[in-house]
Image (cartoon, helix red, strand yellow):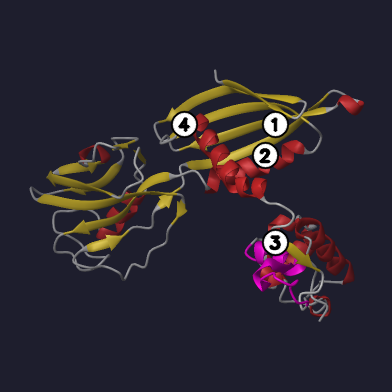
């Protein structure tokens, strides 16, 4: 059982793993409890940890595969059960673990008839397959099949253009997301001024990091992302209520920001889910193909009233949510 404690202000926050199990080689589960927090702090930590675990934890995957003598993704090779497309999909699902951030190469050279699995891939020393039995392709005739692969470590996912095939080398839509799912819940204890919160965090991984390792990496990424703010001084950035105002003498124009414009830039690609709108207002926006804050800011208050089933009450709710979450307002015209 893992335990850890740290002191935040006057609080001593402790965490421990209360449940850990391996459902199969490519599905690991962990449940952690972190406590105590003051009222409202668990939601901040829970949301941040969930997003960082899903989006910032690095995974290793196959990003390109080469087949000799193949010219098209949907080609077939005599003696192979699957099409090249099917083989690429299976390679995409291979769960790998790497100790290096460098691009690596691997080769699978097999003579059939045989079912080719992840264990048949000759991997570099710094890379290993999480599940050696993971299926790739079936060779039905006594032929030799060679697959050259490129392996990279990254986070998130990468969608490649399938028409970028050169000399039998195909891009693979890599999914470098070893964390499959994260849930968090808030539990209260105590009463009155002494009431505190406990965070329960559940995490599922593909086995390349354990749940504990994934939480550790997600925490480090959050610290790295927020560390620049620790060194910001009030004199480093000047704010102006009027974006048209000129900079102070001796100060470059790049140092003057309008608060509303800065908020727009930071949140432009954020989905409207983050506004936590009532269901009616949210559904009306989605039906109008408004999915991000950038989409929403293309509408003025007057334009918003023209959205089907979107009344003044919904406009007020959206305006309030924009201000509360991002300190920005709907354009007036």
The residue tagged 2 is 46
The residue tagged 4 is 210
- Label 3 to label 2, Cα distance in Å? 19 Å
Which residue appears farthest toward the front when viewing the image? 250
- Label 4 to label 1, Cα distance in Å? 20 Å
Q: Is residue 163 magenta?
A: no
**Sequence-first disc among 2 and 4:** 2
- Place of residue 220 in the rendered image (x, y in percent of width and height, measured from the top left): 55, 39
The residue tagged 1 is 199
Circles 1, 2 touching at the beta carbon (< 8 Å): yes
Q: Secondary structure at mark 3?
A: helix
**Sequence-first disc among 3 and 4:** 4
Which span of residues is magenta-colored?
245-269
Depth order, front residue of 298/109:
298
Quarter placement of the C terminus: bottom right
Q: Could you tell me which residue is drawn at 66 percent across and 37 percent down?
A: 184
Depth order, front residue of 207/55:
55
């Amino acid at each position: 059982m893992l335990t850890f404690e740290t002191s935040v202000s006057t609080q001593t926050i402790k965490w421990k793993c209360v449940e850990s199990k391996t459902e199969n080689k490519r599905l690991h589960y962990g449940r952690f409890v972190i406590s105590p927090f003051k009222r409202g702090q668990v939601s901040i930590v829970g949301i941040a940890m969930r997003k960082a675990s899903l989006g910032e934890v690095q995974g290793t995957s196959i990003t390109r595969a080469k087949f000799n003598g193949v010219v098209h993704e949907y080609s077939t090779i005599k003696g192979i059960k699957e099409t090249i497309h099917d083989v690429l999909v299976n390679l995409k699902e291979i769960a790998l673990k790497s100790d290096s951030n460098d691009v690596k190469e691997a080769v699978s050279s097999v003579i059939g008839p045989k079912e080719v699995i992840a264990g048949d891939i000759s991997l570099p020393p710094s890379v290993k397959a999480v599940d050696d039995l993971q299926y790739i392709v079936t060779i039905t005739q006594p032929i030799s099949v060679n697959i050259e692969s490129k392996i990279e470590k990254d986070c998130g996912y990468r969608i490649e253009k399938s028409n970028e095939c050169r000399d039998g080398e195909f891009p693979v839509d890599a999914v470098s997301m070893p964390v499959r799912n994260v849930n968090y819940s808030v539990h209260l204890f105590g009463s009155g001024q002494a009431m505190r919160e406990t965070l329960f965090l559940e995490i599922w991984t593909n086995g390349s990091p354990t749940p504990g390792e994934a939480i550790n990496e997600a925490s480090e990424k959050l610290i790295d992302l927020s560390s620049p703010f620790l060194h910001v001084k009030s004199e480093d950035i000047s704010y102006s209520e009027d974006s048209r105002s000129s900079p102070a003498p001796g100060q470059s124009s790049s140092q003057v920001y309008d608060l509303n414009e800065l908020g727009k830039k930071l949140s432009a690609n954020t989905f409207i889910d983050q506004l936590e709108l009532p269901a009616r207002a949210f559904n009306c926006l989605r039906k109008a193909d408004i999915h991000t804050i950038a989409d929403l800011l293309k509408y003025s208050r007057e334009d918003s009233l023209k959205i089907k089933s979107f009344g003044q009450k919904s406009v007020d709710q959206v305006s309030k949510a924009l201000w509360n979450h991002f300190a920005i307002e709907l354009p007036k015209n």
